[in-house]
Image (cartoon, rainbow, N blue to C red):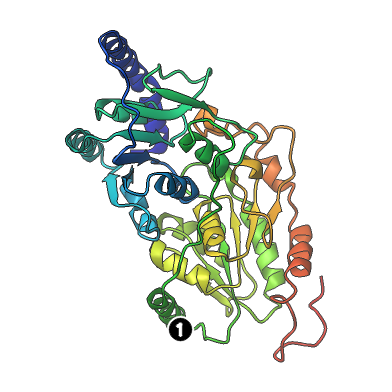
Amino acid sequence: MKIKYIKMIDRHIGWVICVMLNLHYRLIRLLSVAKDESAPKKILIIKFFGMGSVILTQPAVAVVKGRYPLAKIYFLTFSNNKDILTLFGIIDYKLYVNLRPLHKFIIDTLRIIIYLRKERIDIVFDLEFFSRFTSIVAYLSGVKRRIEFYSEVFWRGDLYTCGVKFNPYFHVRKNFLRLVNEGRYGLCEAGMPVIKISHELRQHARKILMKHGVSEDDTRVCININAGELAAERRWPASYFVVLINKLSAYHIKYLMIGAKYDMIYVDDLISLLEHHSNIINLTGRLNVIELAGVLHESSLLITNDSGPLHLADAIGTPVVAFFGPETPVLYGPKDGHNLVFYKNAMCSPCLNVLNAKTVICTTDAQCMRDIKPDDVYKTIVDRYRPIFMPTKDRPNESPAT
């Protein structure tokens, strides 16, 4: 099932279901007794869409675990996020719903609702952005305390017991923290937990690289020209990547092209346009998320569009060069420090946001991305990361010509 159909179902069918459940909830509240404010023993956290967003929930999960150390943490997400959750050790129970095919999605959803009702969850933090589906799941699961984002623009009723306003001027990580703090300020905030890469995973990543002709002595830079299925408009133009990679190829570095299986044709087409291929290692479609984490750990830099690998590298501690346009780095940018963000702040940007279900309606042919020129990017990267991009014994002593 395509993403656009999922959004359509959530917006229209979800609205009908929310209306019916709101009538039920208002009737129940007339007969309700006093709230149970005792410390929860079982806590559910929901975040379905986006590998990067799932990574950004982890500081909030850490806060919840720190506040209720004896409580069991359940995390509900789509099955394609299964690998990323294995990299975090805070979660006690990982629950998954298959997005495709449709009948599997329906069966899994009903199975999860039945399971959660049996578990008698005490509190749920719904970290999804204005999804009627997650409100429905949380309500039908019988959870007494339901905390989620609310908006005057996107109606999903009052199925929550506590609504926290999403602030578009705060980073998504901080919005997640505000939600688990139930909208209150002055409570503890956790930094991004660094993903611990085990010795075994490091060794496995090195074996993968050696298999593809990358030695221990090679400097490695990962390049992600993709942007996932959500919005192709987030991709920096392929022709710009060609110019940038051709210029960077003057340095004695191995460039590792990464991406999912559905990105293989797009990446192959770009590689065919490059002037030099001997230093290009195409790992697109050949790594799972855990292996990608290991390869990113063993690399000196990631050059990427706004996408999941950006947040994965940032959580690991690998420096990131990122391109933003339809989305704003104010909400999704990497941490300050050794990272570099290119963003032109066009008048029409950002057009992709949580209130329009992250749907890009571009009237300028992604001018916000095309305004980021490859020559400027090249000079800035080489200047910023001189220890990586410097002449070696295999190259002339002078820096490559710009």
Give percent across and percent down for residue 213.
Answer: 49, 83
Query: Left of 335 or right of it: where is 205?
Result: left
Of residues 86 and 310, the one drawn nearer to the viewer in this rendering: 86
Give percent across and percent down for residue 328.
Answer: 64, 41
Of residues 312 and 208, the one drawn nearer to the viewer in this rendering: 312
Query: Left of 175 or right of it: where is 139?
Result: left
Is residue 287 among the parts visible in the rendering?
A: no
Residue pictured at 65% horizontal, 72% vertical: 275
Q: Quadrant of the C terminus?
A: bottom right
**10 shown above or below 247:** above
Is residue 210 among the parts visible in the rendering?
A: yes
Residue pictured at 29% horizontal, 34% vertical: 122
Which residue in the structure is indicated by mark 1? 210
Residue pictured at 41% horizontal, 81% vertical: 207
Number of on-image labels: 1
Query: Left of 375 or right of it: where is 297?
Result: left
Identify which amino acid the numbered label 1 is placed on: Met
Q: Residues within 10 Å of mark 1 (few under 14, many from 20)?
A: few
Local SS, label 1? helix
**150 shown above or below 242:** above
Residue pictured at 40% horizontal, 74% vertical: 201
Residue that extends furthest to the front in the rendered view of this protein:
38
Q: Quadrant of the N terminus?
A: top left
* Quarter of the rendering containing residue 291: bottom left
* Quarter of the rendering containing residue 329: top right
**229 shown above or below 199:** above
Give percent across and percent down for residue 47.
Answer: 40, 41
Give percent across and percent down for residue 287.
Answer: 40, 66
Query: Left of 259 or right of it: where is 252?
Result: right
